[in-house]
Amino acid sequence: MFNTTLDLFKFNKTNEHDEMIDTIAETYFNAMTECASDHRCDDAIACYQEWIVDDKDPQDGGVEIYFMQDLTAEGIEN
């Protein structure tokens, strides 16, 4: 049905899509808390700002996340 896994994410809301978003959120949260623990406040704030969109947490809804085509894959023209 789909040529690549990327096609699946681009055209369907799936559990995998949600899991990827959860993983991204968890990664930013862990980085932010680690930076805060190390007293690197500017880095912690930067992690927060990378994840938050227009003062909204994407996991709370109201934010669309698009997965772009992998431009590093062989055979793809840029």
Image: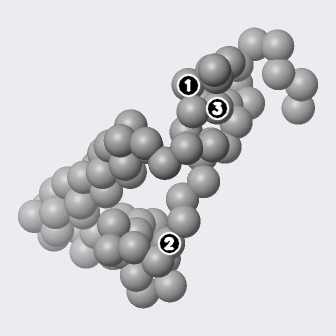
Residue at figure coordinates x 57%, y 33% from the top left? 8
Residue 63, labelled with which disc?
A: 2
Q: What whole-number distance in Å separates the C-alpha atoms at marks 1 and 3? A: 5 Å
Which residue occupies the foreground of this view, 26 or 20?
A: 20
Say if mark 1 contacts mark 3, CB within 8 Å.
yes
Q: Quadrant of the N terminus?
A: top right
Residue at figure coordinates x 20%, y 54% from the top left? 30
Which residue is label 3 attached to? 7
Q: What whole-number distance in Å separates the C-alpha atoms at marks 2 and 3? A: 20 Å
Q: Earlier in the sequence, mark 1 or mark 2?
A: 1
Which residue occupies the foreground of this view, 55 or 17?
A: 17
- Residue type, numbered disc 3: Asp
Q: Mark 1 packing: few (<14 Cα in 10 Å), some, or many (20+)? A: few
**Residue 78 drawn at (x, y percent):** 88, 32
**Residue 15 drawn at (x, y percent):** 35, 41
- Residue type, numbered disc 2: Val
